[in-house]
Image (cartoon, rainbow, N blue to C red):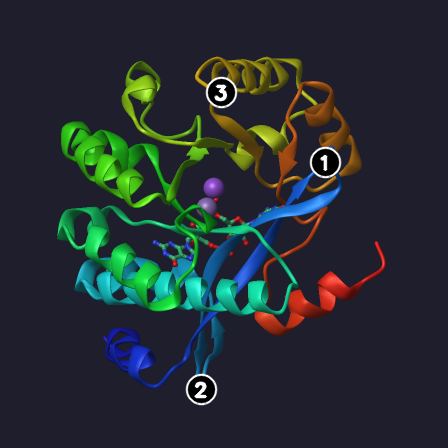
Amino acid sequence: MELERDLRKALVNEELEVYYQPKWDAESNHVSGMEALIRWNHPRLGVVMPSEFIPIAEETGLIVAMTRWMIHEVCRQNTAWQSLDLLHICISVNMSIRVFESGLLGEMVEEALQETGIKPDNLELEITETIAMYDLQDTIKQLKQLKQLGVRISMDDFGTGYSSLGSLDELPIDALKIDRLFIRQSDLTSKQAIISAIITIAGQLNLEVIAEGVETEEQMSFLKSRGCRVMQGYYYGKPMNAKDIEKWLEQPD
Ligand code: G
Ligand code: G
Ligand code: MN
Ligand code: NA
């Protein structure tokens, strides 16, 4: 397939780019972190979104090299922002099950930390319920090794995957990200109950909680009223490349 052939070249030809989406602390009104999202600037097709090429990267195994590049680039950029005193935050990178299967994640992270000198807790890995449940014992083992390096772990899209509720307390994670499907329907009493329950579980397990896909002021106020402090979504900022993040940070409010 053509896209697959092009994707193999994308890494070497430096066609991949990291976009960053702010996470907002609604109590202190500050950027509290960012999520890194990969983009492909295809020489003919223009910007290709991850939904179109991550599946190909997973099938071909290219996802491993791509994730290695992502982690390194995110740590490099974060170090640059810190030395300019622009930001002192943690940036998260999305993980694929293939990367866990490769058994190479630990060394990738260790390498990036060493080469960039970033503080380990300024890097976060976002896993999914699917990764956790695929091989729970192996995931726990790998996550424990990653925690020993000092990086943060969060559970992405929480509440919509294969439920890991029964083993949530066994996973060495730092945060839960409430799936944006719940936030989108947070005008419904039933979804409000689920959101509240997730916030309560997070609190009782000593996990931070973050709402994804916050698009409106109503959603923001509701979440805040239920004790969710950190939010991410178009209401605060869409994913932007590094240059646009710098411009966005300079805006007065
Ligand atoms: O902006 P958005 O279209 O970026 O992302 C779509 C999906 O692609 C999301 O589920 C997101 O987690 C995933 N994604 C984005 N960047 C990466 C990446 O670097 N690695 C992996 N595995 N998934 C990513
Ligand atoms: O699976 P994951 O949660 O990593 O996916 C992140 C995806 O969510 C990216 O595609 C990103 O562009 C998208 N996204 C971020 N904020 C919003 C939002 O407010 N609304 C919607 N619909 N999508 C969002
Ligand atoms: Mn994510
Ligand atoms: Na998510």
Give the amino acid at mark 1.
Ala
Q: Compute the Cα span from label 2 to label 3.
A: 45 Å
Disc 2 secondary structure class = loop
Q: Compute the Cα span from label 3 to label 1.
A: 17 Å
Instruction: Report the residue marked by disc 1.
Output: 26
Q: Please identify the quarter of the rendering in which residue 160 is found.
A: top left
Q: Are marks 3 and 1 in contact (CB under 8 Å)?
A: no
Which residue is more in the foreground, 4 or 98? 98
Identify the residue shown where x is 39% and y is 63%: 117
In the shown orientation, is residue 107 left or right of residue 33? left
Q: Residues within 10 Å of mark 2 (few under 14, many from 20)?
A: few
Residue 132 marker: none
Q: Nearer the observer, disc 1 or disc 2? A: 1
| Image position of 43 with respect to 235: above or below | below
Mark 1 CB within 8 Å of ligand 2? no
Which residue is more in the foreground, 42 or 32? 32
Nearer the N terminus, badge 1 or badge 2? Answer: 1
Measuring from the top left, give residue 26's x and y in whole percent. Answer: 72, 36
Give the amino acid at mark 2.
Arg
Measuring from the top left, give residue 226's x and y in whole percent. Answer: 68, 18
Instruction: Report the residue marked by disc 3.
Output: 202
Q: Please identify the quarter of the rendering in which residue 189 is found.
A: top right
In the shown orientation, is residue 47 left or right of residue 58? right
Measuring from the top left, give residue 195's x and y in whole percent. Answer: 57, 20
Measuring from the top left, give residue 201's x and y in whole percent. Answer: 48, 15
Instruction: Report the residue marked by disc 2.
Output: 44
| Image position of 193 with respect to 223: above or below | above
Give the amino acid at mark 3.
Ala
Identify the residue shown where x is 64% and y is 63%: 85
Q: Are marks 2 and 3 in contact (CB under 8 Å)?
A: no
Identify the residue shown where x is 29% and y is 57%: 55
